[in-house]
Image: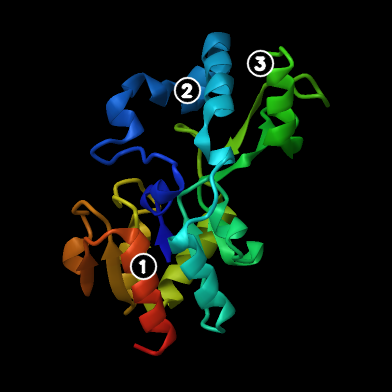
Amino acid sequence: MLSGAGISTDSGIPDYRGPNGLWRRDPEAEKLVTYDTYMADPEIRRRSWRMRQESPAFRARPNVAHEAVARLERSGTPVRVITQNVDGLHQLAGMPERKVLELHGTARAVTCTRCHARSSMAEALERVAAGDPDPACLVCGGILKSATVMFGERLDPQVLGTALGVAKAAEIFIAVGTTLQVHPAASLAGVAAEHGARLIIMNAEPTPYDELAHEVIREPIGSALPALLAEIGEGG
């Protein structure tokens, strides 16, 4: 399964590229997650930390779609999740860490851009709340960023390589809540189809890969995904 922002909207986390997505409502917001701009401009970093403070992702809880995925895995059906999301909700719903590939990293941790020391986002946000608008690395004094892949950064080649292997081996590949416009993540749907997977696309809007799909589902994810996964679990 490849999951995108649409699977988390029922948890109160807005998507980015949908009709009401963040980038459409506030094009300036993209600067806050663009690596070169973030590194060069202290004001952008301060705005980024304020955005993180206000983010609903840290208050969000898994919804019925996340829970349905974890339930299918617990039933004994082999499940791997490749996610474009950074919210960690698949794991909070009960998916084992080892079975979730976070292509774009995680917003629940921070990393130093100089020494690569890693710590929790909660700890960094505590420092911001205490009055430090741009907290530096406590190890070396370098610039901290969320442990997500910003625009202008490369995906982790090991994570991407594992995701490609999963896509090639899949018997059923479900792309859920993703516009399939961001590469290389989007190309995984095509890779799966080329290697014989039954490709199912579940998204409110059309995607570039719809014509390759065995089935395209436009129904709300919160009801359609649990129903589909229950059918798969029963051998449908």
Q: Which mark is residue 225?
A: 1
**Mark 2 to mark 3: distance in Å?**
13 Å
The residue lying furthest to the left in this view is 211
**Residue 101 sits in which quadrant?**
bottom right
Q: Earlier in the sequence, mark 2 or mark 3?
A: 2
- Residue 235: give x, y in percent of width and height: 39, 90
User: Label 3 is placed on what type of residue?
Assistant: Asp
**Mark 1 to mark 3: distance in Å?**
40 Å
Q: Which mark is residue 32?
A: 2
- Residue 114: give x, y in percent of width and height: 71, 27
**Mark 1 to mark 2: distance in Å?**
32 Å
Q: Is residue 156 visible?
A: yes
Q: Assign the C terminus to one quadrant of the image.
A: bottom left
The residue carrying pointer 2 sits among few (fewer than 14), some (14 to 19) or many (20 or more) residues within 10 Å by Cα, namely many
- Residue 165: give x, y in percent of width and height: 49, 69
Disc 3 marks which residue?
Answer: 134
Camera-side mark, 1 or 3: 1
Q: Is residue 149 visible?
A: no
Q: Is residue 113 left or right of residue 41?
A: right
Q: Assign the N terminus to one quadrant of the image.
A: bottom left
Q: As rendered, which of 151 and 232 lies closer to the eye?
A: 232
The secondary element bearing badge 1 is classed as helix
Q: Colour scheme used in the picture?
A: rainbow
> Quick check: 24 above or below 89?
above
> Quick check: 21 above or below 34?
below
Q: As rendered, which of 90 and 183 lies closer to the eye?
A: 90
Q: As rendered, which of 97 and 166 lies closer to the eye?
A: 97
Q: Earlier in the sequence, mark 1 or mark 2?
A: 2
Q: Is residue 216 left or right of residue 195?
A: left
User: Label 1 is placed on what type of residue?
Assistant: Leu
User: Label 2 is placed on what type of residue?
Assistant: Leu
Badge 1 vs badge 3, beta-carbon distance below 8 Å:
no
